[in-house]
Image (cartoon, rainbow, N blue to C red):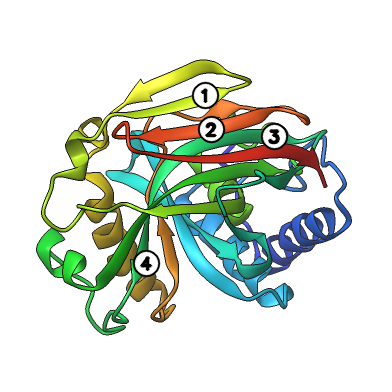
Amino acid sequence: MAIQPITTDMTTAIARRFVAARRDGTALPEFPGQVPATLAEGYAVQDAALALTDGVVAGWKVGRINPPLNGVDRLAGPIFADQVFTADGAEPCAMPVFADGFAAAEAEFLLRIGTAPDLAKTDYTIDEARTLIDAVHVGIEIASSPFPGINALGATVTVSDFGNNNGLVVGDDAAGWRDGDINAWPVELWINDARIGAATTATMLDGPFGAARYLFEHLARRGIALTPGQWISTGAVTGVHPVQVGDRVEARFDGRFSVHCTIKAR
């Protein structure tokens, strides 16, 4: 029997469950409804959840879909202002996760939008996207969801719960990004003083500015405007690394920059 498309009422019901679980810090042992069959259905849930929350969107995360789904190799989700923390280099900030849900840390380059993209423009080159960026920082994305199976069930489920984002740690300005090739910078992710992953963004599709290009096109098609000052978290360089409450996380970039956080329960 063919799976029936998700109705508007079903979409809203799923969104309400996710928004409530995030607000209350409670877990969802099962996906709260019919699993979205397509990315469009997943983004319909995300749109409904955005309409149900009064949180201010301070940026967007971009993640990889591997293998691609119907030719789409990236996904997006909002990052809320009250979950963005600036690392001050002294005491690591404490980042909340859903202890009974899914939780991971990712080393990422963070791009700051300097000029808002034209909402009517749905096709960019990487160079065009790059001209709209006014700063690049090193950082850590905290991926966490009340639903522990969010990644296991695939991209349609990931996008339905805000792209599995639950916070951003903004580290130092990545000095030299304008003139150098950050795709060649070695990146490492350490948890509790053990190196868990190492890579460069040369392995990440078309790199951080390609992630910006994707996001500008994707949000324009959804009719969502971006504004100067918003962040783009461009994708996990070394992978998606599970974390637990109490873990110490450090991301290192090019042997020159590092950013730290600790993990706490919501």
Q: Amino acid at mark 1?
A: Trp
Identify the residue position indicated by label 4 in the image: 112
- Sequence-wise, the earlier of marks 4 and 2 is 4
Q: Amino acid at mark 3?
A: Phe
Q: Nearer the viewer, residue 225 or 199?
A: 199
- Sequence-wise, the earlier of marks 1 and 4 is 4
Q: Marks 3 and 4: which is nearer the front?
A: 4
Q: Is residue 231 visible?
A: yes
- Sequence-wise, the earlier of marks 3 and 1 is 3
**Number of the label disc, if any, that sits on residue 250:** 2
Identify the residue position indicated by label 3 in the image: 102
Identify the residue position indicated by label 1 in the image: 190
Residue 23: x, y in percent? Answer: 83, 60
> How many residues crowd mark 3 within 10 Å: few (<14), some (14–19), many (20+)?
many
Q: Marks 3 and 2: which is nearer the front?
A: 2
Q: Verify CB contact (< 8 Å) between mark 1 and mark 2.
A: yes
Residue 111: x, y in percent? Answer: 35, 60
Q: Is residue 151 visible?
A: no
Residue 41: x, y in percent? Answer: 53, 57
Q: Amino acid at mark 2?
A: Glu
Provide the secondary structure element on which disc 4 rests: strand
Tell me how far mark 3 sits from mark 2, CA to CA: 19 Å
> How many residues crowd mark 1 within 10 Å: few (<14), some (14–19), many (20+)?
many
Q: Residue furthest front?
A: 90
